[in-house]
Amino acid sequence: MSFTRFLGGGWRVRLLMLLSLVGILAIVASACGDDDDDDDDDDEVATEEPADDDAAETATEAAADDDAATGDLVVRIPAGDPIVIGASVPLTGPDAALGIDSRDGAIVGIEQWKLDNEEQILGHDIELVAEDDGCSDAAIATAAAERLVDQAGLVALVGPLCSGGAQAAIPIYQERGFVMISGSATRTDLGETQPEPRFFFRAVFRNADEGIVQCRYAIDTVGASAAYVVDDTEPYGEDLANAAQECLEGEGVTVTREKIERGATDFSALASRAAADNPEVLIFEGFNPEGQLILTALRAAGYEGLFMSGDGVASVTDFIEPDPELAEGAYFAGCGGDYPEELLALYDEHIGNPPTTPFVAHYADAARILLTAISEVAVDEGGELVIDLNELRDTVAATEFETGFSFTGTIRFNEFGDRAGETGEDLGLPECLVEGGAFVTL
Amino acid sequence: VVEAVLARFRAIPENLKTPLYIIGTFILAYLLIEYTPLIDPIPPIWQQQIVNALSLGGLYALIAIGYTMVYGVLQMINFAHGEIFMLGAFAGLWVFNQTTDLHDNAAGLVILMAMIAAMAWSGICALALERIAYRPLRRAPRLVPLISAIGASFFLAQLVNVILRGRPQPVPRVFPEGSIQIGDAEVDYIRLFLIVMSFVFMLALFYFIRLTRTGKSIRAIAEDKDVAALMGINVDRTIQITFLLGAILAGAAGVLYSLFIPTLTGTMGFIPGLKAFTAAVVGGIGNIPGAMVGGYFLAFAETLGVQAAFEIDPELGAEASGYKDAIAFTLLVLVLIFRPYGIFGEEVGKKRA
């Protein structure tokens, strides 16, 4: 078309559109620039909806004002009343399966503790009360927290289950001095950014740990000199990919970083680049079906290196079954679900149908850590049970849960309340390869 | 001699010229790639990406035609078209799973049967969709069938997911593996098949619309539904045929897609559907060659845009790969600013005005 027609046909409108487009592009460009400058902030900003941040901030302020958590915090349980362990997990909605299994994991942990110790603590029964926390929904998680902290006899809790809900609810529990141990909230910065003094602990690895374990395997076992790190532009995937990339680059590995969108299906452009460079490893951080589709595209394009991924992709039905031959040899960090016999036996006895989600053992361990600490701290005052919550916090923080006793390996907490350790064994983070159509733990 | 050739060329009816141009371009491109040093300076990775874009574009174009044809006759966006594509892919999968014994010896036959089944099934579903979700709303305000279409889209995607209990369905590898070398690019047989077949289907449709009586009535209804009805064209029937044609192409695209994307889910139609819809708009909605060009345009923009970012700087590439769609859609917005009716949309726009 000609320029004169351009001028003739409502050119002001078009010029305006063009200008606004340029403006939008400039804004996008400057936003990207900021991201590049400050990678550390990336995780925090990218992972949370504004609503969560607001809720968390308000609650943090409240906690700071009262400074209640540092004062004398004592729970008194009258004679005959049970000791209540709370559970903040989703019981409805799309994450209900995960929440219910994890709650049941805590129940199994309590039963295991009773077998190892005694039925009661100083004459008081032990009871689990679960509240539906809506997983990542800050509003539901805080509402669940408000109900739980007012629950008579509450001493401590397992959960919150999801990182988004945890961020919102932690300050509410912290203010009242209740120790939380999550067996599943893996977002990297959750421990570091919680209000002090820290009452939130994790029996589970952090996302960054998963990326680091993958990185160690790529370097120590594969001997990689070049790697592709691909994420799905979602909080979980980016969190892992950033950690893996940082670790690999720290060891002098050349990293090419790529991103995909969730829901995309054609990955041939990415695969062609990877095949041309042919790095020894390609790490994908995200979920299925993308993980499975990327592997397919990679092999079709002639990529020969190792395909590595994490717990988001490690699924028999979604990753292996579509093409077992193709999946063969793939590496995973965090291929949970391979539970110890004694845990499964207890689960069968008290719950029934076997667990299908990956954090059951972490929750069983979380519950046992709490009970062990409570039995150490609790004092009997004429039938009334008195528990100093600050002392309980310190006892939990000093926990040493050894392999053989724990279901998920050695458990220790670092200064942030995160699970300490550098190996998959210490972190409760199994590594495995796909062999003969199944995940085989290394 | 030149005069004579030119004269003969002018004598070719206008209808035949467009496909001749396309075929000519292909032959020319092939000759240039094979027998001149022209392609050598293009790095192998770019050649490979061009092949990737051609196959993706073929897929987008096949789906986009369905959007554009329905819009042409009804001025309605059939948002459930992506699901028609998905249903076609599943029909193909059904045939693949029924004919496991034949995969090694008669792959061609199996694929042909899968194509036919997919086209038939997609066609049936589209007719049912038209009858149930759209025809009762023919006289309603324009937004009403649009909402109905969005509802149908979600319904079909979720229905399939519920039936499959959310499990992705693996597609057996029927197509013979292997590849040929064109320039420096390795082109899988599957990809080559996809590229060629998408052209064959588009040409077939082009002729159908141009040369047959039904094609003429579709064009007439696109021009002016009421006048066409006065001329004795059965409007309802022609609209059905339009849905059918779009669905047949989408069904074929579904099988082509399942040949190289080996897991199918109920929601797999959504993103390709959205991309194809965009392609139809950028080509000029209501215009069939426009939908084809738009499909290739979009595929090239999203494939080569990211590759270009990688060439400039790997870190920029890493950022850009996450903004693949943003790059492609920015280009589309630019196109639409200068050509609000789309690349080929001008004529349609003028006629309507």
Image (cartoon, grey):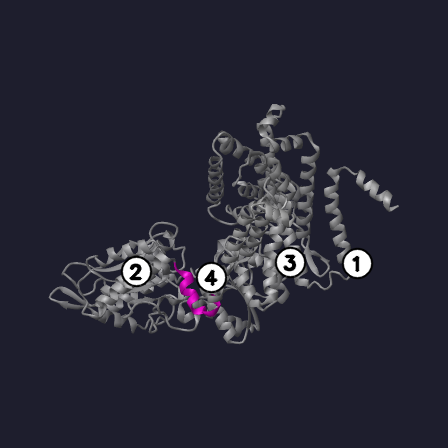
- Residue occupying the point 74% across, 50% down: B25
- Which numbered disc flags the more N-terminal residue, 4 or 2? 2
> Residue B224's x, y, as percent?
60, 30
Query: Which amino acid type corresponds to the residue marked 2 in the rendered image?
Result: Ala
Query: Which amino acid type corresponds to the residue marked 1 in the rendered image?
Result: Tyr
- Which numbered disc flags the more N-terminal residue, 3 or 1? 1
Q: Indicate the secondary structure of the residue bearing disc 4.
A: helix
Q: Are marks 2 and 1 on the same chain?
A: no
Label 3 packing within 10 angstroms: few (<14), some (14-19), many (20+):
many
Mark sitting on residue A237: 4
Mark sitting on residue A169: 2
Q: Are marks 2 and 1 in contact (CB under 8 Å)?
A: no
Mark sitting on residue B49: 3
Q: Indicate the secondary structure of the residue bearing disc 3.
A: helix
> Residue A195's x, y, as percent?
30, 68
Q: Indicate the secondary structure of the residue bearing disc 2.
A: helix
Q: Which residues are magenta?
A: A35-48
Front: mark 2 or 1: 1
Query: Which amino acid type corresponds to the residue marked 4 in the rendered image?
Result: Gly
* Residue highlighted by disc 1: B35
Chain under numbered label 3 = B
| Marks 4 and 2, how far apart at CA | 23 Å
Q: Are marks 4 and 3 on the same chain?
A: no
